[in-house]
Image (cartoon, grey):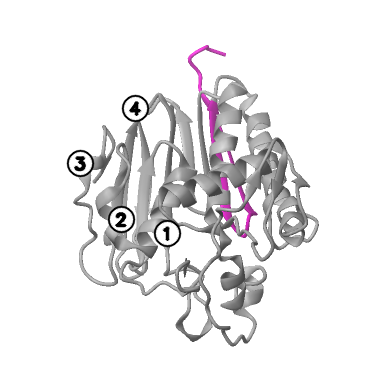
Amino acid sequence: MSTNDVFEARRDFRAMGTDCSVLIYGHGTGVEALADLARGRVEILESLWSRFRPESELSRLNSRSGHGSVPVSAETEGLLRAMRSGWEWTHGAFDPSVLASVSANGYDRDFSEVLASEFVAGVGAQAPGLAEVTIGNRTVSLPRGVGVDPGAIGKGLAADMVADEISEAGAIGVLVDLGGDIAFAGTPGHDSMWHIAIHDERVNDSDSPSTGERRHLVPAGVEHAGIATSTSLTRRLAQGRHHVIDPSTGISTDETLVQVTLAGDRAWECEVWATAVLVRPELLGSLPAGTSCVAFAPDGAPRDDFKHNTHNEKVA
């Protein structure tokens, strides 16, 4: 076997309520073990963070709101720190404390069960925010009345964590896709670029496949990169509702924008800003440096005129 030989291993599976895949590149057949390790780590993180599993750390934390500090793993501590950072950066446009409103709007169980149920939406209420959440060394304390929903930030952070771990374990290239929250690092085999597809959720693939996809290109050898999409067009609920909640009202966003895709250094940070822009479209003008953004209104061409935020990445 030549030292230049590059092996590829892929795993496709369901986790975190969505379709997932991991793609690993490396020298030697050990890539198969790395692919299995990546899948296993995603499943472990799901067991820690799922709000639909009563035994998860996240469920236990939410059930203990108002009762002091709760011991948590390093992974869950990191999740809560990421949540609070995103809330602070966006001045509350991204707010994981919308859990009560998400449940009141019908998303109170696995989405397959939600679709099969009849539900009358409750009254919306402003999210309490994360100002009083206390995060210590492997402990978290939620104030009374505050519950957190990891939502898509959990998928983004999990993708980042697994991509880092598999790179450190010896992969020359790794891509982790958890329902469209994507983290990748290194080199994709012998290719000179990572090609990441951005799907326009407004387009029916069977009607117009050529117009439903854009490409995000990143040179091989990147230390770590991420891309995330927030959209109101999937996970539609009854009575015209959707799962993206405006923290200021406790009800679904007004859909001035219906999809925001953001690319940058970390998938979880991209998810924070994509969600924030979907909630408050005016934030398009104040995205962090080094990010690329494509925003989709209900009709018309996508808005990708914020290229001053980019470094070398491009959306084409």
Q: Give the image quarter of residue 224.
A: top left
According to the picture, the residue beneath numbered tag 3 turns out to be 308
Asked whether the residues under the numbered discs 3 and 1 touch, taking CB atoms below 8 Å apart as contact, a structural biologist would say no
Predominant secondary structure, magenta span? strand
Q: In this view of the protein, can residue 75 be seen by the observer?
A: yes
Residue 7 marker:
none
The reply to whether the magenta stretch includes residue 288 is: no
Q: Is residue 305 above or below residue 175?
A: below
Could you tell me which secondary element the residue under label 1 belongs to?
loop
Could you tell me which secondary element the residue under label 2 belongs to?
helix
Q: 10 Å neighbourhood of mark 1: few (<14), some, or many (≥20)? A: many
Q: 10 Å neighbourhood of mark 2: few (<14), some, or many (≥20)? A: some
Asked whether the residues under the numbered discs 2 and 4 touch, taking CB atoms below 8 Å apart as contact, a structural biologist would say no
Residue occupying the point 62% across, 60% down: 17
Name the amino acid, label 4: Ser
According to the picture, the residue beneath numbered tag 2 turns out to be 283
Q: In this view of the protein, can residue 271 be seen by the observer?
A: no
Q: Give the image quarter of residue 73.
A: top right
According to the picture, the residue beneath numbered tag 1 turns out to be 93
Residue 192 marker:
4
Asked whether the residues under the numbered discs 2 and 3 touch, taking CB atoms below 8 Å apart as contact, a structural biologist would say no
- As measured in the structure, the alpha-carbon distance from the residue carrying label 1 to the one carrying label 4 is 37 Å
The mark closer to the camera, 1 or 4, is 1
Magenta part of the chain: 1-25
The mark closer to the camera, 2 or 3, is 2
Name the amino acid, label 1: Ala
Asked whether the residues under the numbered discs 2 and 1 touch, taking CB atoms below 8 Å apart as contact, a structural biologist would say yes
Q: Nearer the viewer, residue 94 or 107?
A: 94
